[in-house]
Image (spheres, rainbow, N blue to C red):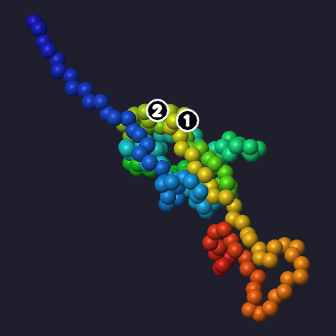
Amino acid sequence: LQSSVAVNITILPVPEVTGITYGNRTNGDNLPVTTTSLTLLFTDAMACDQFDLGSILQVHDITPDVPETNTRVDGNSVCTNGNQKLIFTAADQELKYGHTYRVSLATGFANENDNPLSLTYGSADKSWTFTMAQAPTVEIVPVDGADNIAITLPDHIFLTFSEAMDCDT
């Protein structure tokens, strides 16, 4: 007696990261220091409640020639089941002017079908970097220490800032 068995196998695709945003920007260069959150976007809904998100997504300061290089940035990661987003918000004053940061994902982070990310997103080719803008500078006219400055009306002393200032604060 001969029998045959048909087996249908469905191979589910592994999740991938489709993008990253920094605040409301997709470019991670010269971000204003007020940018405190980043969002990773995935192809699939992720099984967020099965993971310690603080261990899954990590942000490190990798600024060269700085004592705190490779220091982990404190913050909070948020993700809800059925969602294709993982949002990281840095703690107050954690991101510093002129510093460069690396974002990485630990292995094992999986979608709702228990399929893990396809590669180690903590490796150099699967991590992201972003850089904060330089600290604002102030240009004072006349220069500090200048002597014999004649001020006649309508002459003024000017302060010029390198970025827009909030005059209400």
Instruction: Compare residues 36 and 133 and report the one nearer the observer.
Output: 133
Name the one closer to the observer, 12 or 130: 130
Where does residue 145 sit, x and y in percent of width and height? 88, 73
The amino acid marked with disc number 1 is Ala
Q: In the figure, 143 relative to 125: above or below?
A: below
Tell me what residue is drawn at x 65 percent, y 79 percent: 168
Q: Residue at x 84, y 86 (%)?
A: 150
Which of the marked residues, 1 or 2, is nearer the chain's N terminus? 2
Q: Residue furthest top?
A: 1
**Residue found farthest to the bottom:** 153
Q: Is 29 above or below relative to 52?
A: below
SS class, disc 1: helix
Q: Which amino acid, mark 2? A: Leu
The one of 160 and 153 positioned closer to us in this rendering = 153
Category of crowding for the residue at label 1, using alpha-carbon neighbours closer than 10 angstroms: few (below 14), some (14–19), many (at least 20): few
Mark 2 sits on what residue? 119
Image marks 1 and 2: residues in contact by CB distance under 8 Å: no
Residue 124 circle label: 1
Mark 2: which secondary structure?
loop
- Identify which residue is drawn at 64% across, 75% down: 166
Measured as percent of width and height from the top left, residue 112 is found at: 38, 40
Q: Residue at horizontal 46%, vertical 32%?
A: 119
Task: Write down the quadrant of residue 63 in the picture.
Answer: top right
Quarter of the picture holding the N terminus:
top left
